[in-house]
Image (cartoon, grey):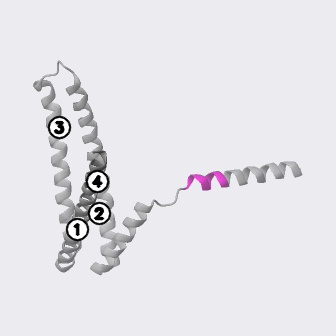
């Protein structure tokens, strides 16, 4: 009886440890995105209803975009394989190329629809502020990229100098 209890307790401990090992904490990237989202919500002074609507919209947009991206990647892979064939013709590739163009157009439409959905949720003042925040963020990324590129360029030139 004692042995059975010990075995059961041991199994429970092992199951608990195994389940704890499989639960992964949020990635640093996800934590960063969550903080960014909270910052935007605070800056825009959103109501709880607006926050919920934006989150619901984001999830819906994400699901639809993921679906289109998956289809697009599949079609592009098929096209890539077709183009490897030395006997493939333009006529054979054209329908697949048209499907890819259609999926790219759907992505573009999805992006435009997403912008208008956000525009409906936010007040005009909030939307203007959101656009400015987005612009500032984009400019900051551009500046960081330029700095990285310059740094890399200098490093590469330094390596070429030492090679001579």
Q: x and y percent of residue 148 in the render?
A: 28, 60
Residue placed under numbered mark 3 in the picture: 99
Would you say 109 lies left or right of 71 here? Answer: left
Disc 4 is placed on an element classified as: helix
Contact between labelled residues 3 and 2, with CB atoms less than 8 Å apart: no
Q: Are marks 1 and 3 in contact (CB under 8 Å)?
A: no
- Residue 159's spot in the image, x, y percent? 30, 50
Q: Earlier in the sequence, mark 2 or mark 4?
A: 2
Q: State the mark number for residue 57.
A: 2
Q: Specify whether 119 is left or right of 13.
A: left
Q: Are marks 4 and 1 in contact (CB under 8 Å)?
A: no
The magenta segment: 17-23
Discs 1, 2 touching: Cβ within 8 Å: yes
Residue 138 versus residue 72: which sits nearer the camera? 138
Disc 1 secondary structure class: helix
Residue assigned mark 1: 118
């Amino acid at each position: 009886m004692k042995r059975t209890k010990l075995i059961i307790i041991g199994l429970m401990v092992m199951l608990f440890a195994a389940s704890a090992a499989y639960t992964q904490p949020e990635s640093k990237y996800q934590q960063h995105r969550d903080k960014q989202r909270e910052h935007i919500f605070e800056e825009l002074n959103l109501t709880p209803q607006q926050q919920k609507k934006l989150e619901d919209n984001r999830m819906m947009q994400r699901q639809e975009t993921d679906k289109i991206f998956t289809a697009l990647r599949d079609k592009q892979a098929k096209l890539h394989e077709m183009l490897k064939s030395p006997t493939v013709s333009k006529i054979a590739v054209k329908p697949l190329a048209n499907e890819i163009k259609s999926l790219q157009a759907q992505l573009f439409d999805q992006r435009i629809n997403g912008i208008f959905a956000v525009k409906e949720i936010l007040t005009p003042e909030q939307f203007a502020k959101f656009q400015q925040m987005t612009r500032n963020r984009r400019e900051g990324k551009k500046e960081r990229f330029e700095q990285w590129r310059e740094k890399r360029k200098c490093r590469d030139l330094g390596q070429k100098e030492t090679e001579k």
